[in-house]
Amino acid sequence: MTGAHATLTETGADFAVFSRHAERVELCLFDDAGNAEQRRIAMQRSDDGFHRASVDGLKAGTRYGYRAHGTYEPDNGLWFDPAKVLVDPYAVELDRPFQHDARLSQFGADTAELVPKAILTALPDTPLAPPLLPPGGVIYEVSVRGFSMLHPDIPHTQRGTVAALTHPAILAHLKRIGVDAVELLPISAWIDERHLPPLGLSNSWGYNPIAFMALDPRLCPGGIVELRDTVATLHKHGIGVILDLVFNHTGESDREGTTLSLRGLDNLSYYRHLPDQPGVLVNDTGCGNTVACDQPQMRQLIVDSLRHFVRHAGVDGFRFDLAPVLGRTATGFERDGETLRAILNDDLLQDRVLIAEPWDIGPGGYQLGNFPSPFLEWNDRARDVMRRFWRGDSYMSGPMATALSGSSDVFGRDRANHTRSVNFIAAHDGFTLHDLVSYAHKHNEANGEDNRDGHNDNHAWNNGAEGDSQDPAILAARKGDLTALLSTLFASKGWIMLTAGDEGGRSQKGNNNAYCQDNAITWLDWQKLDEDLVALTGSLADLRKRFSHLHDPGFFRESGDVQWLSASGHPMSVSDWEAEHGTFIGLVMTTADAQSGKTVRLAILLNRGEAFSFEFAADVQAQWRDVFSGNLSFPVEIGRRSVKFLLDDSVSLS
């Protein structure tokens, strides 16, 4: 690490922490239990803003924290309170999880018994290999805790942890459904939002960090070694690991929030404030504060955090929550901002997978398509198009074709010839795939906010009943919709992301903001997964890997490698594209077939209307077969609200 940190030496340990505005900083050493403060050591301040101390006789396992002295004037952005024990921003291991207590927000209230202590740790290096996520690969979004809490084969002591991902039953499932990389919701140490404990609720997602490098003891009790070993095991099975990281805000929240680390060390240096109003925190995140990514010390902390997870755990890449904050300055988002460039130019990071959630809620916060290459980007525009097409909205033929083709309208700027889109239809935030077709409205009453939280416009539909139903016709319609949605996702150009459980029809009972439901609402019930849908997902993944055009992120060329067909079997006309109630889109692509070694024609037929018989025009010599069954199909019987995959390999086109 190149920033401030604690390092074991041959004789003890060296400590360094940054605070430009503190008058002085003390290093606090605790007993082995992390409860009793045993020594306070005055640190020496340097002109560069670092406070340093060297202590002989310390060993791995030593618990420590800091106390910062200075002026306490929140109206001027100064929060120095020596009663607060502060977590090292460079902590790599903590002795306990964060928990709320009123004293964390009270000036003068000592917090030594409340705050987790950083642990001096000897960090393991790990051999590096190229990232495992291939072009157009399948990303599987996993909430570590909820993913394995109810898995019947996993020992109870391992459930809800990172290590559970190495269990043979989990590995078999990941391989069965064709996962190329797991994307883990935040596993860095976090604190619950302060309004949750009084409601009897707790954070289940982890998007409220305090220490960026330290892994939360509830999810990763074995620390960085547990993560390293898990990554290594997944790598042996050909599966990459992407960490979802939050560098846009911290759990210290707004002015009424806690003082746990950055706020107490140097609020003015680590967070953004309104111009000429140092007491007013900028809130471009909706979480109470915004990390000052344009400040050198915060930039270094971010880069060092990424390097830490690559060097010591071997992770394949990162997904950045509310990523525009990484490029924000006082004047707005800069795609070539110093922090984004520092990540892209770092020798240890330059080949890693980088995925941006390209929006925040600040001015100019929607930046889809504007991140520098090679950043991949979550594509919510394609998400909404796919939802609206299958819901039956008007004028969706053109937008649907564009989404299936990799969203060249977004990612084809500056003459780019390939997409950087991460396509998804559902994610952790919002309805599950099952609930998308089972609820027309959100049902977040369990969150304790009178159903005010969460998105109101979900482009969802319920197929005739809101929520649970025993009506066979409604259940069949929902399953048909799920089949069509999964098929559409796997047929789209770009990388694709599937949230854990969506391959088997997981429900959250209509809750589209389940961040605070660490219970059966978010825990994946493996015994209730729909086996037909799981099998379909595996077949779709095999299909995607088999045909080159499905996983190739390159845009379709104008030279005829794809043809768009109407329900008549003829090429789409202008009137077909502009039809208000168009219900059918067909595309025929010329693509390499890894199974036969030939260049073949693959047809994908999407029908959101009633069942009908489809015939290809002028295709007398073709022998169209259903890809999955192998049966000859001519004419093609297309069911209501369904997707067909057909193969013509009668003549090699290579």
Image: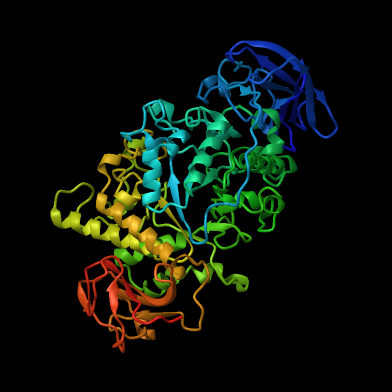
Q: Is residue 513 visible?
A: no
Q: Is residue 310 visible?
A: yes
Residue located 71% across and 50% down the image:
347
Residue 583: x and y, percent?
A: 29, 73
In the rendered view, tell whether residue 111 sits above or below residue 375: above
In the rendered view, tell whether residue 266 sits above or below residue 370: above
Residue located 27% across and 60% down the image:
481
Residue 488: x and y, percent?
A: 36, 64
In the rendered view, tell whether residue 622 sits above or below residue 278: below
Residue 325: x and y, percent?
A: 61, 49
Q: Residue furthest right?
A: 47
Count of labels in the image: 0
Q: Quadrant of residue 66?
A: top right
Q: Quadrant of residue 451?
A: top left
Q: Is residue 613 left or right of residue 387?
A: left
Residue located 14% across and 48% down the image:
470
In the rendered view, tell whether residue 403 sits above or below residue 530: below
Residue 446 or residue 189, whichever sits in front: 189
Q: Quadrant of residue 30?
A: top right
Residue 286 or residue 29, whichever sits in front: 29
Q: Quadrant of the N terminus?
A: top right
Q: Is residue 296 left or right of residue 238?
A: right
Residue 91: x and y, percent?
A: 64, 29
Q: Is residue 162 left or right of residue 176?
A: right
